[in-house]
């Protein structure tokens, strides 16, 4: 098995700088797969299928939904470290991250308020204020956590990641390349042992309906930003490992096979605290490495197809708007209404298409223009140049 040669210095300062500056298109394509997993989770949870089918299906789709979210957290750290620039400053980095997520967030936040008012829902400060400032994941209160647009709680975690990244990246960049695998293993072990710590320290009473954990245990494992920062930190270490030419031991088929094993373990251990993050940490990290390896070496990758890259570019907007489409469509029809399996699948596919169309509009007219206009500070014109131009 071949591997990327290991340089003695950071690739961004050597002859392979153009490679490091690439966008790793396979990882872009994977983003949509992760977002689609979350979409299917919410289709099941919102009762589009009959109650009998929902009870059976939710066991599988909840696991796939969490897989998608954990992948996003890890991918975020990986890509930020991969594309890190030595001459970057903290304000510039934070400005780019703000321009990337906040305009889309505010648009979907406002849209959610308008649609909720149309649906006759009560608009309280607890539902809208914490989510506007992306602090809702810091509380276990379900009203606050649910916010006005449920998926935005993950941005609350991402905001912490972005604030910490400049210091975390500087620390990881100082690790000797031959020790990065050991550090990756240590962070992964910490993420995998976290459920055991929560199980031993935090009370499991009262149990959540249908689960063998309390609401506090669930919050600490799923939504609490410092806990989720372990996924992000692992992504940062793996990103540095690839930047420095570290050996990647698995190709994509093997990595996906291990991920399937991890998903099976997740289902086996559910609904306990050990069925959430523990089985997926290592396989997801290997999938990230395998995708990057395929792009660096130029080997075939289905995730690098043009269609997959296009879908991946829409994935953030798709993720941010999909719950609104699914939930309020069902509200308009009647939340008590459910359908047979073929009909429910057909409705879900139609709504997926509608969500993609809306996501394309958000990406084209909000996300990309915001990045283009706000991600870099405007340069102050040189007065001498302005005078010469006026004279001409």
Image (spheres, rainbow, N blue to C red):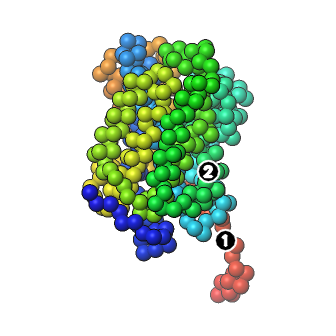
Residue at 44% in and 19% down: 47
Q: Nearer the viewer, residue 74 or 171?
A: 171
Foreground mark, 1 or 2, reads: 2
Residue at 45% in and 63% down: 244
Q: Relative to 116, is 192 on the left or the right?
A: left
- Where's the C terminus, which quadrant? bottom right
List the residue tagged with mark 1.
379
Dot 2: element: helix
Q: Where is residue 375 drawn, in percent x and y?
A: 60, 59
Q: Where is residue 295 drawn, in percent x and y?
A: 35, 58
Dot 1: element: loop
List the residue tagged with mark 2.
162
Q: Where is residue 358 drawn, in percent x and y?
A: 47, 41
| Figure check: 132 above or below 218 | below
Q: Nearer the viewer, residue 120 or 281?
A: 281
| Figure check: 124 above or below 107 | above
Q: Nearer the viewer, residue 88 or 11?
A: 11
| Figure check: 355 above or below 303 | above
Location of residue 350 by image quarter: top left
| Sequence-first disc among 1 and 2 | 2
- Does residue 270 appear in the picture of this structure? yes
Residue at 41% in and 60% down: 246
């Amino acid at each position: 098995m071949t591997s990327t040669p290991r340089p003695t210095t950071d690739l961004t300062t050597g002859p392979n700088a153009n490679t490091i500056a690439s966008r790793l298109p396979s990882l872009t394509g994977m983003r949509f797969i992760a977002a689609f997993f979350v979409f299917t989770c919410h289709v099941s949870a919102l009762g589009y299928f009959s109650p009998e089918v929902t009870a059976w299906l939710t066991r599988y789709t909840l696991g796939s939904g969490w897989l998608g979210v954990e992948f996003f957290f890890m991918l975020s750290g990986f890509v930020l470290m991969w594309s890190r620039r030595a001459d970057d400053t903290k304000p510039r980095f934070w400005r780019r991250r703000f321009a990337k997520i906040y305009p889309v967030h505010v648009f979907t936040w406002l849209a959610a308020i308008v649609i909720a008012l149309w649906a006759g829902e009560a608009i309280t400060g607890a539902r809208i204020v914490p989510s506007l400032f992306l602090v809702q994941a810091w509380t276990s209160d379900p009203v606050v956590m649910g916010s006005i647009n449920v998926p935005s709680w993950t941005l609350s975690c991402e905001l912490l990641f972005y604030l910490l990244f400049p210091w975390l990246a500087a620390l990881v960049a100082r690790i000797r390349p031959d020790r990065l695998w050991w550090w990756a293993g240590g962070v992964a072990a910490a993420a995998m042992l976290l459920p055991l710590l929560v199980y031993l320290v935090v009370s499991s009473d009262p149990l959540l309906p249908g689960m063998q954990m309390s609401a506090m245990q669930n919050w600490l494992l799923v939504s609490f930003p410092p806990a989720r920062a372990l996924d992000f930190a692992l992504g940062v270490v793996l990103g540095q490992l690839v930047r420095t030419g570290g050996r990647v031991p698995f190709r994509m088929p093997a990595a996906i096979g291990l991920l399937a094993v991890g998903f099976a373990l997740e289902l086996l251990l559910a609904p306990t605290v050990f069925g959430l993050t523990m089985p997926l940490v290592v396989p997801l990290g290997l999938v990230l490495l395998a995708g990057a390896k395929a792009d660096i070496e130029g080997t075939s990758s289905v995730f690098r197809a043009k269609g997959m890259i296009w879908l991946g570019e829409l994935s953030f907007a798709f993720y941010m708007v999909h719950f609104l489409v699914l939930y309020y469509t069902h509200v308009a029809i009647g939340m008590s209404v459910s359908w047979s399996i073929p009909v429910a699948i057909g409705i879900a596919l139609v709504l997926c298409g509608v969500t993609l169309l809306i996501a394309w509009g958000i990406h084209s007219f909000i996300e990309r223009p915001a990045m283009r206009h706000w991600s870099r500070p405007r340069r102050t014109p040189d007065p001498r140049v302005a005078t010469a131009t006026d004279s001409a």
